[in-house]
């Protein structure tokens, strides 16, 4: 017995030691093989950068299976998604059958665990997605593939799939949608290696947030899903047994089945609410669910039921139905004096997945009483694809001052009265075909004496009045009168295509008149005054994305605008907003102590690369005011801070904008002209060095007189065409370029006193005496100005000048003779140019007269056609509706013929006018020769 006991103990000890040795040795043996396979396979399959901090292989952690895991795993995008992390895991682990790894021919996976995952799915505006990272298969790769590696197969025999503490974000820039899921936990268990099994699924989400078109529909909603699913894995048929889905306190029960024969998904699901407590429905309202929800008193009954049935594939979707009803709902906060009563809702939605035009939406009843303010509406929608038909009514009155008696407002205050009585109905094609008499739309919406203030608002919003009258043809905005802090804005006008805009997302068009005495953007953006000059720009704004389905023509009259450090007075002009592009037409304003006219476009269609393309005409601008007010000027040309004076400039400016609506400096493309009577420069290191080089103090703090130059900006450099100016009594020709990085590359021709020759001046005069001349008082010196604006370098330009005094003297003598000849030629050219200019000016006046006469004739033709068309329509109306319709078509043809005649007159006048101008230019060209 003792021998047997000793033998047993020794055997147990040997087995334990063998197990410990295996637990230590096996991971060491197989870790390099598995790590090599993991890295090779992941990087070869993906168009992305895959990396992980550590690779674990453990027998103890997965006993009796082998645990294989990666820590710090990340998948980072490339190209358009460079540095954009698609997936990151704190830990990703699988348990595999140990013997299948040893055999290395059929690896059997038993469980998968994802811990601390962070997934970001993104769709760009152009439709590109960041998860399309799988490389396409290539036959050539398969042919040379390692036969040992290709022999390895994976068998999924999962008993457990688990996700812990995961965050998922879906950001769709193409449809302006965003979904964020925080702290997702999911456990799926069952023996998936069997043909038939029960799958137990448990899922919880601590926080779900959902935005669409900038509106937040879900805020920190809690989700739960529990289900027992009978699965036939061979036939891909799944039956829902015991299951429930919950969002906040709203719970839905499911029953039915899902099967996946081939590529189709056959769905047969029913759902309904297990309870009729109205409070469960209230939990779906973010503002209510976040405020003392447990203490709310409720009464009333509600129900939700519906189904999803049919086949889902690339050609069709399943049919669906949902019904929501509320009877006599009520809720009240215990600490507030009033309640929301008489909540009654009856809504049914049918969706036809085969023929979506059969889809209908019926909101037969939606009514409530908000603390003594009754509100009711109904809405019906049919044939949404072929020709949407709508029928609805909105009637109600809301006194916002009583809102605080119903729901907690915290530090938010509201006052004012909203009144609505809107009735509409008909087919949208009636509006599109201008059959306004067949579409019903009448009523008014009016908001008066509205005040709104909240902690996150920069200032109180006061809407004195908004009044809109509805007709089938248009919405008449009678008055919009609003103030925010010291700013005010008033509008009136007409909005067209309003009903199709609301129901079919078609383009809303209109004409608006916009007025303001003061628009202080700094107050509206930050709630505080503009930043101090030396402080960073804290009022920087984000990209302004213009809606693509709005087409407005706005006439603007604003007395004063303040933005950052820029003040604009008396802004007049028009702005045409269409397709995500704003066209600025002949805007005039007073700014920078001068006057400005501008036209051009702001294009936000690519919200990541918005761009501007403007034409400016600025007169008498103060340099110092411009430098202090315009941030771009400070970045592009910081040396302007040392300049004073007034300039006029005409230039074209195009650039991409960054996320703060500031120009991307290297993308600026500009060109134009600049004029000034005098520009004073102080503390310039370049001119100080030039003064030292020429031994002339006038250059140390110079005043450039009679400046008239052309310039351009491209690829991060400013180019200045050579121009003539004066510094004191010295002539100077100056040109070249400088970078935004302040590197200098200028050439200058300076007329300096001949005394710089010293003792050689006598020799020079002796040489010139042979030609009956003498050395002039000034001699041209050609210079290079290089280096940077803070460390300039001055050098002789050997390509255009010389430091040899004798050569300079000879050249000067030749120049004197040449100057006399050139002066005579210039006088002749001047006279010829004057005659040529007069010919062209007279021709332009004649062309203008021709066009004016044509305009008068065209106006007469148009009026005659309009009178004839109206007479035809009036006669048709007298003979009945059929004759009226025929007359309307005839009138339309009359107008079209009239417009064709008008266009013919205008075209002939243009042709004649252009011929007159062309002839004058030809004659002028002959004179110029």
Image (spheres, rainbow, N blue to C red):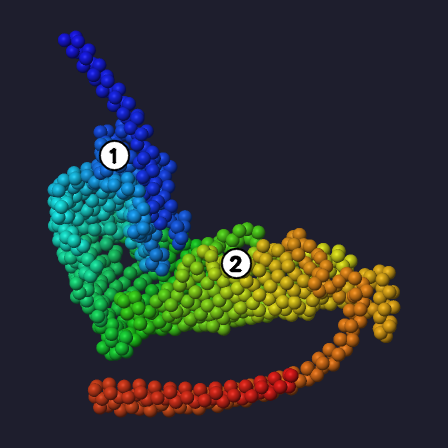
Q: Residue at x 25, y 41 (%)?
A: 151
Residue 153 seen in render: yes
Residue 90 seen in render: no
Secondary structure found at label 1: helix
Image depth: mark 1 or mark 2 in front? 1
Q: Earlier in the sequence, mark 1 or mark 2?
A: 1
> Residue 838's x, y, as percent?
62, 86
- In depth, the one of 560 and 922 nearer the eye is 922
> Residue 851's x, y, as percent?
49, 87
> Residue 639's x, y, as percent?
63, 57
Question: Would you identify the image quadrant in which residue 795 lies?
Answer: bottom right
> Looking at the image, is 888 positioned above or below residue 112?
below
Question: Would you identify the image quadrant in which residue 895 lies?
Answer: bottom left
Residue 632 disc label: none
Left or right: where 781 falls relative to 11 = right
Name the residue that disc number 1 marks. 101
Left or right: where 791 falls relative to 216 = right
Q: Residue at x 25, y 72 (%)?
A: 428
Question: Would you identify the image quadrant in which residue 320 lies?
Answer: bottom left
> Looking at the image, is 198 positioned above or below residue 431?
above
Q: How many marks?
A: 2
Residue 666 disc label: 2
Q: CA distance from mark 1 to mark 2?
A: 57 Å
Left or right: where 600 falls relative to 759 = left
Specify few, some or many for label 1: CA neighbours under 10 Å numbering under 14, 14-19, or 20 or more. Answer: some
């Amino acid at each position: 017995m003792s021998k047997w006991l000793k033998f047993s103990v020794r055997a147990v000890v040997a087995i334990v030691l063998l197990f410990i040795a295996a637990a230590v040795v096996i991971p060491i043996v197989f870790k390099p093989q598995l790590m090599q396979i993991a890295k090779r396979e992941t990087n070869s399959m993906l168009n992305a950068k895959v990396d992980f901090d550590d690779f674990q292989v453990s027998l103890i952690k997965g006993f009796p299976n082998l645990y294989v895991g990666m820590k710090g795993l990340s998948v980072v995008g490339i190209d358009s998604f460079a540095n954009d992390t698609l997936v990151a895991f704190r830990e990703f682990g699988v348990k595999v059958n140990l013997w299948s790894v040893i055999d290395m021919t059929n690896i059997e996976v038993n469980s998968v665990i994802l811990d601390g995952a962070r997934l970001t799915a993104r769709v760009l505006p152009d439709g590109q997605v960041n998860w399309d990272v799988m490389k396409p298969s290539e036959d050539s790769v398969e042919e040379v593939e390692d036969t040992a590696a290709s022999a390895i197969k994976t068998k999924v025999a999962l008993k457990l799939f688990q996700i812990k503490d995961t965050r998922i974000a879906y950001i769709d820039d193409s449809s302006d949608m965003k979904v964020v899921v925080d702290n997702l936990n999911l456990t799926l268990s069952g023996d998936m290696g069997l043909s038939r099994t029960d799958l137990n699924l448990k899922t919880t989400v601590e926080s779900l947030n959902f935005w669409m078109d900038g509106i937040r529909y879900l805020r920190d909603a809690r989700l739960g899903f529990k289900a027992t699913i009978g699965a036939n894995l061979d036939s891909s048929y799944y039956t829902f047994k015991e299951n429930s889905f919950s969002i906040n306190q709203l719970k839905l029960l499911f029953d039915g089945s899902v099967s996946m024969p081939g590529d189709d998904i056959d769905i047969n699901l029913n759902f309904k609410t297990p309870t009729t407590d109205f409070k469960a429905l209230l939990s779906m309202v973010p503002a209510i669910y976040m405020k003392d929800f447990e203490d709310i008193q409720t009464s009333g009954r509600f129900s939700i039921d519906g189904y999803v049935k049919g086949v889902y594939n690339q050609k069709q979707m399943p049919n669906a139905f949902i019904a929501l009803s509320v009877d006599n709902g009520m809720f009240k906060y215990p600490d507030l004096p009033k309640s929301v009563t008489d909540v009654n809702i009856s809504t049914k939605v049918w969706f036809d997945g085969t023929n979506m035009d059969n889809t209908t939406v019926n909101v037969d009843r939606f009514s409530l009483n908000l603390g003594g303010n009754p509100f009711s509406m109904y809405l019906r929608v049919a044939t949404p694809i072929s020709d949407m038909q709508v029928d609805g009514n909105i009637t109600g009155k809301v006194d916002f001052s009583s809102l605080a008696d119903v729901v907690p407002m915290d530090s938010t205050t509201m006052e004012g009265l909203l009144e609505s009585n809107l009735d509409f109905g008909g087919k949208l094609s009636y509006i599109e075909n201008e059959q306004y008499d067949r579409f019903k739309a009448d009523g008014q919406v009016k908001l008066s004496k509205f005040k709104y203030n909240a902690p996150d608002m920069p200032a109180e919003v006061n809407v004195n009045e908004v009044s809109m009258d509805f007709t089938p043809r248009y919405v008449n905005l009678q008055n919009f009168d609003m103030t925010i802090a010291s700013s005010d804005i008033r509008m009136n006008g007409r909005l067209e295509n309003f009903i199709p805009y609301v129901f079919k997302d078609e383009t809303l068009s209109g004409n608006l008149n916009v007025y303001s005495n003061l628009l202080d953007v700094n107050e509206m953006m930050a709630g505080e005054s503009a930043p101090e000059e030396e402080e960073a720009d804290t009022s920087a704004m984000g990209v302004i994305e213009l809606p693509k389905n709005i087409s407005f023509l706005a006439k603007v009259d604003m007395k004063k605008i303040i933005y950052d450090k820029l003040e604009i007075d008396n802004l007049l002009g028009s702005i045409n907003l269409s397709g995500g592009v704003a066209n600025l037409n002949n805007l005039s304003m007073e700014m920078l102590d001068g006057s400005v006219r501008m036209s051009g476009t702001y294009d936000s269609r690519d919200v990541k690369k918005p761009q501007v393309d403007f034409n400016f005409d600025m007169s008498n601008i103060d340099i110092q005011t411009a430098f202090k007010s315009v941030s771009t000027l400070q970045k592009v040309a910081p040396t302007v801070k040392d300049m004073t004076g007034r300039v006029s400039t005409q230039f074209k400016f195009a650039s991409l904008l960054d996320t703060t609506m500031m120009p991307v400096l290297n993308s600026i493309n500009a060109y134009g002209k600049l004029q000034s009577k005098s520009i004073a420069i102080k503390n310039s290191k370049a001119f100080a060095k030039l003064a030292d080089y020429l031994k002339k103090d006038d250059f140390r703090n110079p005043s450039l007189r009679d400046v008239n130059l052309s310039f351009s900006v491209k690829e991060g450099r400013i180019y200045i065409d050579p121009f003539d100016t004066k510094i004191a009594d010295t002539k100077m020709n100056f040109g070249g370029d400088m970078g935004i990085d302040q590197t200098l590359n200028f050439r200058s021709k300076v007329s300096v006193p001949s005394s710089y020759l010293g003792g050689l001046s006598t020799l020079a005069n002796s040489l010139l005496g042979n030609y009956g001349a003498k050395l002039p008082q000034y001699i041209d010196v050609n210079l290079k100005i290089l280096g940077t604006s803070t460390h300039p370098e001055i050098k002789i330009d050997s390509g255009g000048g010389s430091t040899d005094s004798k050569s300079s003297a000879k050249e000067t003598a030749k120049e004197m003779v040449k100057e006399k000849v050139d002066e005579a030629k210039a006088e002749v050219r001047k006279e010829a140019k004057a005659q040529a200019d007069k010919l062209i000016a007279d021709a332009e006046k004649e062309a203008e007269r021709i066009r004016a006469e044509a305009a008068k004739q065209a106006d007469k033709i148009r009026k005659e056609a309009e009178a004839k068309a109206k007479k035809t329509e009036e006669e048709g109306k007298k003979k009945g509706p059929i004759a009226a319709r025929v007359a309307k078509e005839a009138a339309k043809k009359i107008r079209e013929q009239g417009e064709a005649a008008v266009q013919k007159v205008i075209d002939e006048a243009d042709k004649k006018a252009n011929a007159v101008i062309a002839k004058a230019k030809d004659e002028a060209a002959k004179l110029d020769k």
